[in-house]
Every structure is written in C-alpha cells, then in structure tokens.
Amino acid sequence: MFSKILIANRGEIAVRIIRACKELGIQTVAVYSEADQISLHVRLADEKRCIGPAMSSKSYLNIENIIAAAKAAGAEAIHPGYGYLSENGEFAKACGREGLNFIGPTPENLALAGDKITAKKIMEDAGIPIIPCSKEGIGTLAEALRFSQEIGYPVMIKASAGGGGRGIRVCADEEALRMEFPVARMEARAAFGNDEVYIEKCLPEPRHIEFQVLADQFANVVHLGERECTIQRRYQKLIEESPSPKLTPQLRQAMGKAAVAAAGAVKYFNAGTVEFLMDQDDHFYFMEINARIQVEHPVTELVTGIDLVKEQIRLSSGGKLEYSFEDLKPKGWAIECRINAEDPAMNFRPSPGVIEEFHAPGGFGVRVDTHLFPGYELPMYYDSLICKLISYDLTRAGAIRIMRRALQEIQIKPIKTTIPLYLKIMDDPNFQQGNFSTHFIKEFLPEEDEEAED
C-alpha cells in the first residue's frame, strides 16, 4: 500500500479521496489553484501545494506543475479523481516516466476510451451489440449525408474524442444535418483539440444504463451492478440510482456479462464504467467506456458496501480481486441528486457567490458529498457541481421519500441551486413509477430552450 498520495483534483471528489486515504492510513497532498487556497480539500489534506493561477489550463490541467508538486512532496502515487486529467493518457504516461503510480486505468485504456470509433470496433468484434454507426471518422458533409441516409434519421453527430456528454448534436433530418455538421466539428475541435466526428443512429426514448467494473493486474474483472443514469439535461446526468427500476434479473445478468466482456476485450485495469443505451424493447447497445471513477459512484457503494476509491488504491498497489457481484449480495436502493449552483427557473443560469448559510441534511439513509462550508466563495472558473446528495433505503419508494425529506432539509443560501427541480421530480408520478427516458427533463421543463448555448 502507498504511504503518500497526491490528489490531482479539487472540490468534492478531492475531499472524497482524502477521506478514503485517511481511513487507509495514507498521507495526502492537496494541489490547489490560487482561487482555491481556502477550499475544504486544502484544509483536510496533510500537505498542500499551489500549482498555478485560477484558470484550469494553468493549474489543474498543468501536467508539469502537478508532477513537480508530487515529486517535491515525496508522493508515491497520484489520484486524478474525475474530470481534468483523469482520462488523459499523456498524464498517465508522464506519471510512469517519473516513477509515480497513476491510480486509474493504463495509458492504453485511456487512449482507447478516448477513441470512440476504435472502441466500438473492438466491442463489435467481441460480439457486444453496438448502435449502428460509421466505422470511420466522417470528414465531409457529403459523407455524413450519405451514411445518415443509409441508417435512417434521426442521427447523432458525436465527437470521436468526446466524453462527459459533450460534443453531441442530434439531427432529425437532412436539413438539420446540413446545419449541425460544421458546428459539431468546430465544437469538437474547441472542446477536445480534435475535430473528427462520427455518425450514430439516434435511438428514440432510450434509457442510459452503466455498469461499474473493476479489474486487477491479474486479468480478473468483476462488475458491481448497474446505475440508471437516464435523467439528464443536454447529456449531462442529473439523477442516478442503483439498481435500475427497468432491469429484470435476466437483463441485469446479460448486461453485466457484456460489461465484463467489454472490459476484458480492452484488457482494462482499475475502476471504470461500461455505458449502454437501451431501447424501448429492452435491446441494449454498447456506447462507451468511461475510464475513471464516476461522479455517481456513491450509489454503487451504498448498495454493495464496497468503497470504490479504496478499491482503486488497493488495485493500483497490486491488490487482487477475489469476489464477484453475486458474492457481494447487493441490497437496497440508492439515489443521487447532483446539486449544481444553477437556477433551473432561468434556463440553468450559473449562480456564483458566497455561501452564507450551509446546512447538510442528516438522519437514516442520507449521505452528503460536498466541499461547501459557510463563508466559502464559489470560484467562477470551475464546474457548477457543489454537492451530491444521496439517499438509501431497502426499497426505491423508501429511497425517494428519504431523498425528498433530505432535499427539504438541506440549506444552501443565498445562491440558486437545482434543489427545487429535484423536489418536483421526486413528486412526479412517472419518476416514481420508473417510467422515463433521456428526454424526461425536456418534457418536464418544456419551456427550456434546449438549443440555447451553455
């Protein structure tokens, strides 16, 4: 086991990793930008190192500064969390060159996860169902029109190097494709430094279901069950739960088997998720592999009893997997609401400011992952996620009731948050019955302009 780990991240995930390290008896090093010098993760860590100005490109994305901080502190390993450099193969390689253990997938895994086209080819060869899509990157509008005509509209234009729901455009017909294709390529280049896109068939009213996988250095792979991630806005997840209200035991077994096969096909290592879309006839299709810890990992932890961050650390230090999903005997139901500093009533307008009042809910079945405290000023430079509220009970109905109570109890003032939206969703009959698709939020908030720029 490592004796000192540097956490190359900020916010709630940095706090989460620091807590796991403390419980394992591991010393922690926090890195921070000039805008984050009073942040909670900095306060909780054993050591702290400033890595640059407020802008992420000069701090949390600065590989050279992070590596230098780790070496200066005598850290043996780096945990990247999610976002930022967590899926950056060059960062993982740089860690290896400098004798630092990257707590996450291999550089090869990261490269493949970032190459959606190649990943789909590998899955298809492994016998895992994939959504009809172009086999190569599409470079011209003429190619896009020809292929879209072959598979039929609606289609999605997706960035080959995309991830996190970014770089996606839906086209209902040829006219929309003509308009969106050049825009999609420009967005892909701006977001990922690569303007290659591909075309994929758009499934009507799908559900988004992902399987948590773990893999060790001895080619052992297990899945820890699924997470329902269907409640989304503009391909960004809002509410996640485990298990899925949609899956039967037979379907769960089939999808879990496919997830393990997918991880095995790419010789995956450490923690990751295999993402699927499922149509209205319960046919499921491989979408992508997310090669990192997920924002929504707490719901899996609550139903399985496995600390995924500790498992990441254990596997990276040479640990072996000696259990299966069935061995864990998953129990109960967990739901997570991502609370963002945004105003749903104003098209999710960002709501920065100083947190004058913060009261975290408590009681049976409530977990709060956050970096907030009274007096904390939300930096304008970073993601709007400020808190993850998770409920747990033996039944889904019970988990919904606990979530509703916790949402009523939590206080984050004076900024606007997504809490009012979640309270409405908890009372929605379709949500309560598990009857929804990825279009749920659009239907729930029909006044929102889905085409507006973020």
Image (cartoon, rainbow, N blue to C red):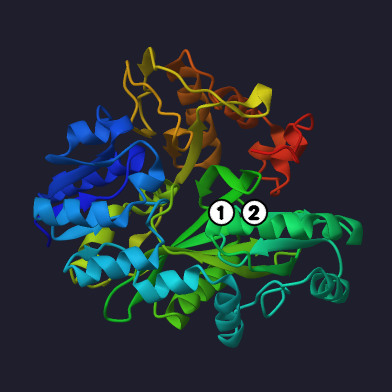
**233 or 249, which lies in front?**
233
Asked whether residue 65 appears in the rendered view, the answer is: yes
**Quadrant in the picture for residue 222:** bottom left
**Which residue is painted at 53% across and 26% down in the image?**
404
Where is mark 1, residue-wise?
191
Vertical placement of residue 16 versus 110, above or below: above
Q: In this view, does 262 lie to the left or right of 49?
A: right
Q: What element carries label 2?
A: helix
**Quarter where residue 376 is shown:** top left
The reply, left or right, for residue 62 in relation to residue 262 is left
Name the kind of residue labelled 1 in the image: Ala
Task: Work out whether residue 203 can be spotted.
Answer: no
Q: Examine the rendered structure and indicate whether residue 407 appears above or below residue 383.
A: above
Which residue is found at the position 63% from the left and 26% from the top? 344
Dot 1 crowding, Cα within 10 Å, few <14, some 14–19, many 20+: some
Report x, y in % for residue 256: 50, 69
Q: For mark 2, does the 10 Å Cα neighbourhood hold few (<14), some (14 to 19), or many (20 or more) residues?
A: some
Tell me the number on the disc at residue 187: 2
As helix, strand or loop, the secondary structure at mark 1 comes to helix
Give the answer, above or below, for where 372 lies relative to 60: above
Measure the alpha-carbon separation of dots 2 and 1: 6 Å
Residue drawn 43% across and 20% down?
Answer: 410
Q: Check whether the beta carbons of the residues at disc 2 and disc 1 lie within 8 A of each other.
A: yes
